[in-house]
Amino acid sequence: MATTNFSVYFILGPPGAGKGTVCEKLVESLGLQHLSAGELLRAESTKSGGEFKDIINGHMAAGTIVPVEITCNLIYNAMQQAYNSDKKTDKFLVDGFPRNEDNKTGWIKTMSDKTDLKQVFVIECSSENCISRCLGRNSGRLDDTEDTLRRRLVQFETEGKPVISHYESLNLVTRIDGNKDKKQVLEDVLEAIKKFQ
């Protein structure tokens, strides 16, 4: 099979900022394929005989970040599956990744020759709104407790912001105000992403 460079848009922001909701709308409106690093990890964590199940569950329970090799492997496998499907999808929204310098470096090392990063959308949202949204969604996720959410918000501030700064230095960042009502956030992202297709 010939190598295909997949078009990628990163959707970043703190937990509860609305990354998943935004991605759902973009899939519906523009036909892009949504890949959530978190959902791929959660699916692998519950897969019977999953190769990375125990490692992922340990990190989720501790509120720490799963090793980049595992996440990149899961993302790339999902891209290949989508491309090899009937839809032949080659444009992807990747939400919740890269989360830190290690993720960014791992992505560049393992994925830069397979992907074309089009833009990084950062959904900014207050800590209070993020916590309220996460606790209100009643997902049953191991990492949706107030203590774990607070750790993840601090982690986003300390580890995620330098990643965003890196992409900002490459003029690849578009910031979206995630504190607005959902409809307005979705309209803002839809208008912004159309500039980079």
Image (tube, rainbow, N blue to C red):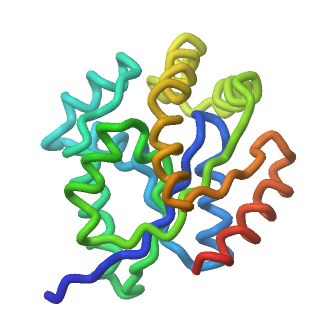
User: Compared with residue 43, is residue 79 higher up or lower down, i.e. above or below?
Assistant: below
The number of discs equals: 0
- Residue 191's x, y, as percent? 76, 71
Residue 150 quadrant:
top right
Seen at 32% across and 42% down, the residue is 103
- Residue 185's x, y, as percent? 79, 54
Seen at 68% across and 24% down, the residue is 131
Seen at 55% across and 11% down, the residue is 147
Side of 147 where 105 appears, left or right:
left
- Residue 129's x, y, as percent? 76, 29
User: Compared with residue 71, is residue 156 higher up or lower down, i.e. above or below?
Assistant: above
User: Compared with residue 3, is residue 8 higher up or lower down, i.e. above or below?
Assistant: above
Side of 18 where 86 appears, left or right:
left
Instruction: Name, please, the residue furthest toward the top.
Output: 147
Rendered-image quadrant of the C terminus: bottom right
Side of 109 where 159 appears, left or right:
right
Instruction: Name, please, the residue furthest toward the front.
Output: 169
Side of 10 where 193 appears, left or right:
right
Which residue is at the front of the view, 164 or 22? 164
Rendered-image quadrant of the N terminus: bottom left
Seen at 73% across and 51% down, the residue is 176
- Residue 102's x, y, as percent? 29, 38
Residue 149 quadrant:
top right
Which residue is at the front of the view, 173 or 151? 173
Residue 50 quadrant:
top left
Which residue is at the front of the view, 196 or 145? 196
